[in-house]
Image (cartoon, coloured by chain):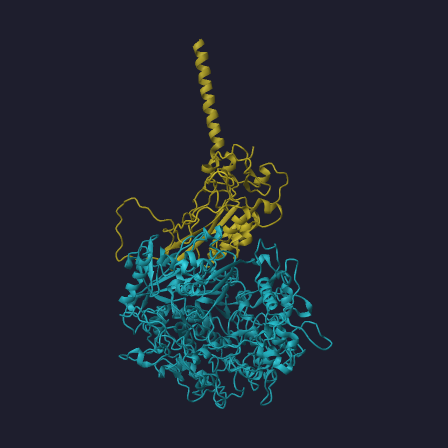
Chain colours: A yellow, B cyan
Amino acid sequence: MPSLSGPLEDPAADAGWESPPPRKGFFTDTSVCIGCKACEVACKEWNGVPEDGLNMLGSSYDNTGALGASTWRHVAFIEQPRKAAPPASAPVALGMPTFQRPGAAMDPDSRTDFRWLMSSDVCKHCTHAACLDVCPTGSLFRTEFGTVVVQDDICNGCGYCVPACPYGVIDRRIGEQGQKNVGIAQKCTLCYDRLGAGMTPACAQACPTESIQFGDLDELRERAAIRLASLQSQGLTEARLYGENPDDGVGGAGAMFLLLDEPEVYGLPPDPVVVTKDLPQLWKTAALAAGGLLAGAVAAFLGGRT
Amino acid sequence: MGRGGATSFLQDLQNSDCIVIQGSNMAECHPVGFQWVMEAKARGARVIHIDPRFTRTSAVADQHVPLRAGSDIAFLGGIVNYILSNDKYFREYVVAYTNAPTILREDFVDVDDLDGVFSGYDPETGVYDTSTWSYAGQEDTPSAGERDRDAGAISSSGESETSQGERAGGHELGGHGAKLPHARVQRDETLQHPQSVFQVLKRHYARYTPEMVEQVCGVSPEDFLKVCEAVTANSGRQRTTAWVYSVGWTHHSVGAQYIRGAAIIQLLLGNMGRPGGGILALRGHASIQGSTDIPTLFNLLPGYLPMPKVGEHDDLPSYLDTVRSEQQKGFWAEAESYTVSLLKAYWGDAATPENDFAFHYLPKLTGDHGTYQTVMDMMEDKVEGYFVLGQNPAVGSAHGKLQRLGMSHLKWLVVRDLNMIETATFWKDGPEIATGELRTEDIDTEVFFFPAASHVEKDGTFTQTQRMLQWHHKAVEPPGDCQSELQFFFTLGRKIRERLAGSTLERDRPILDLTWDYCVDEHGAPSAADVLREINGFHLTGDKAGQPLSSYTEMKSDGSTSGGCWIYTGVYADGVNQSARRKPGREQSWVAPEWGWAWPANRRTLYNRAAADPDGKPWSERKAYVWWDADKALWTGHDVPDFIADRDPSYRPAEGTTGVAGIAGDDPFIMQSDGKAWLFAPEGLLDGPLPAHYEPAESPVRNPFYRQQANPTRQVFPRSDNLQNPSPPEPNAEVFPYLFTTYRLTEHHTAGGMSRWLPYLSELQPEFFCEVSPQLARERGLEDRGWATIVTARTAIEARVMVTERVTPLTINGKPFHQIGLPYHWGVGSSALVSGDSANDLFGVTLDPNVHIQESKVASCDIRPGRRPTGPALLAYVEEYRRRAAITVRTGNTQRTPLPGQPPDETGSRSTATPLTEPTEER
């Protein structure tokens, strides 16, 4: 049985592929994203993902909203105000519970100007993918490239994968019956068909500033580390990588990010954990409990005899 | 500086040490080219964005400088003043390569001494006599201004023939260096002579202090000086700065002068012709550069040859005398070869030396036939039919209502587009139907809609921003009845010629004698490659007869060569379609000369002779680009040298040598009539030899420099259907207290014809919105995501409100000042997936005098919360605003700002001509 949590050398091999190719992934460097949304359009064009609403959300320039069954790339736009002028007198702490806007805790001195952050989000293709682990039909599977893909002709629309994803990526398509894949769970395939033909995924191909980089995950990790060091040396001390750590709750992501602020600012969970992480322990506990119950029942039965 | 195009190329931005993006939202509107800005940034370049709004370009820039829309000349002039008063200019470059040492006439008088106009201004006509702007020692020949003045008369359209003729000529001068009577100029290389260009420049910009910049632009001295320090620190022998602009600069009533302002800075800093330097004019969309090279403009012939004018250019010699002087230097001296080759391409064997190569077949201009004048003519039923191809004037042009009303006067209208755009449907679902101004059953215009083939459905070239032609192959057959423009016009021409066949009328000869024979495919589509070969040109006689020309230097004036556009000659050199070359960048140098083909002669950076010092050595190893190889006695380098290949740097022509032979070895500006770049333009511009700050035609802010408020030569149309908001010193300017600016978003394409019909783009920006600052939202009670109504003297439109800190309130004259941002992609119609009010409906028509471009990047307005009235109530709503502002036809349409206490009528102006219809608004 494939492992369910912790660092893993090669998820494809773990899933049973014999001598798979190097694991593929994305490195999205948000520091050079210009918010053009070419990734969103290229993704929809290539994958035949339908338009999903002509509504103005008014969330800066983001009218897409979130990843979902009909949005496999989503560019977030975050407007961060200038550093507020220091208050005339220091506020008095009243010991009340407080709530801070995400990102408000960052060192204000590192930011003297208005910022408009942009970041193209995508399925993380987790090393330990909860969506895949909970899928009862086998529709979700691990490819030879280490990515996670839905087979829409096998999916029965049960929806177990939807709450399982710690990032809220996968969803069932809503729409009128008769339209393509309505009711079926959908998400980024990392352009499985293009990868098979030796091509770059559509979003990375369309990105004009190389904000979205595609390649072997090992190499991307190196590139990300160098870029991070470069930005930090330029004084962007809040810059950080997200999803690159194999020790995190999903065993590291196949799609990692360089962020300029805390993950929450971009709408990303700060500490995602694969829901199946505790499954072995749960089963063990359940087995123990069952064993205990059984033993008790047996004991009671046997005890009753005497 | 003598050519109509960006001076460098996008890939060259990677070599910049500093990039100033001003009047452009490059990241949003040119995202693919912007990768080279990001590359430069990754290499350590400083990126500065100067723009009223914080955009996606600002988001990745090192510094964003918000300034008041329409104040760029004050900002640029401030930089010039900083450079000159701190001795930050590149002295060797300036002395050797510019006209800084040239002595001007004694009787030139600058704006500061004439209350905001240069010497030669005629308040009766609003036109300059430019003779006092010329170089000393050239008084013997009359200037173009004097020549045109002779034929002054008032036409029925309310514009004098004088100014029409003058203006019709304007754009030709944007296309190439203006001619000089001769190249013998007086120079003072110490730059000390009081009438030297250098000293005149210094005096002219002395008032453009950081304090003045703050007052006019709303930019703090700290932010301003930060820009000055960055561009000067990143210029000189070792470093270069690039300037990038787009339509944020051109769509102004002083637009040509904005660009002149950047040219002056880049010349003073020695950045022209050098890697990582130059001025990049970013073109708005595919092949717009191509559409001025082989123009869709009424006053140009291919290759920036001017269109001849009736009366003045009735024969070839008099035409050529206007284009060039035989006494001047440079390649324009060869204009006869270019013109004759063009005439041979048009009329083949019918063009003979005996008949002036059929020059008389060319149509001649009778006045301004620009797009806005044509709309005015439509309103007066002077225009019967209209072809609209690849544009959507009902949405994309200023004063949409006038555009739509004008089209309702036509007998016929042909619209060729990919989609059923608003221009094709205004007669049934336009805004004027809703207000009752038009009734469908009353419109006699017969509208023909032709579906167009898209670029993947036809062969052809794009000529993009960097003057580069790139061939595209047809990938699929056009569906249904869709056709390429080429096939449409070829077929139309054939049908007309069939109708005229056998005619003996002289007037039909120009059409019947046209060369109109191209290979056609099985669908009847002519070969685009055939057309490109014709544009390239051929040898017609001799042992090379039938072979393609390899360079425009092979063109002859005796009729032995043909060529449809001299600057494109070489694109089919050796019989090979050079524009179809696609050698990958990794297989060639970073200049990538084997990708596509750039005019002229595949040169990627113009005037690259200036990348070397007067002796021909690179200014520095770091910035080596083109240099003189003394051993081979040839110019060489990374690019094709933009110079005579074997001209020694030490070459000095004998006194009186003209034309190409007159170009000295240190004259890098080979298209200029004196071989030097012009800091001061003695000829060629209609509104001044130096950029001077004028307020936009509509502005709530008083010009603090002088009495003159706006460009005194701006082209105005004082008509009851083109009312203007009042600007100070006119009363009631406070009725329209804000400025608005219009722009594009990455998600849409111009007037929406290529995006609002596509679901994947429409969903990304589905609704028309206005961007306002939180402070303005408070001031006017606007709610985020609610509705707002924006009003001008033309109309009122509604938009969803986006309250954002990306719009910064400025401090102008010590008071908070607000600007409103409006993307212009939406229009009122029923065919597109998404629709909405059109931002361009807010504008009136006021034009730059040089190029007839409308001021559509800035105007004044009011904004109120809530949706606008509908139906006839909308007209009443706007009427109430006009009444409150006491707007008449004269308001804002008087070119010369009157003296205090003097009524505008007595100052005299072209606008005193009787308006065609008396305004109903006067009361």
Residue B473 position in % (x across, y down): 62, 59
Please state if B868 lies on the left or on the right of A6 as rendered. Answer: left
Residue B414 position in % (x across, y down): 50, 62
Q: Is residue B783 above or below residue A186?
A: below
Q: Is residue B483 above or below residue B302?
A: above
Q: As rendered, which of B99 and B286 lies closer to the eye? A: B286
Q: Look at the image and tell me in which quarter the C terminus of chain B lies.
A: bottom left
Toward the right, the furthest residue is: B543
**Hey, which quadrant is residue B122 in on the image?**
bottom left
Mark yes or no: residue B909 visible. yes
Q: Is residue B50 above or below residue A160?
A: below
**Hey, which quadrant is residue B837 in on the image?**
bottom left
Please state if A135 lies on the left or on the right of A269 as rendered. Answer: right
Q: How many marks?
A: 0
Residue B367 position in % (x across, y down): 47, 77
Q: Is residue B856 above or below residue A88?
A: below
- Residue name at image x 57 percent, y 56 percent: B482
Residue B459 position in % (x across, y down): 61, 60
Please state if B719 lies on the left or on the right of B230 as rendered. Answer: left
Please state if A46 lies on the left or on the right of B891 as rendered. Answer: right
Mark yes or no: residue A240 visible. no
Q: As rendered, which of B154 and B393 lies closer to the eye? A: B154
Q: As rendered, which of B143 and A303 lies closer to the eye? A: B143
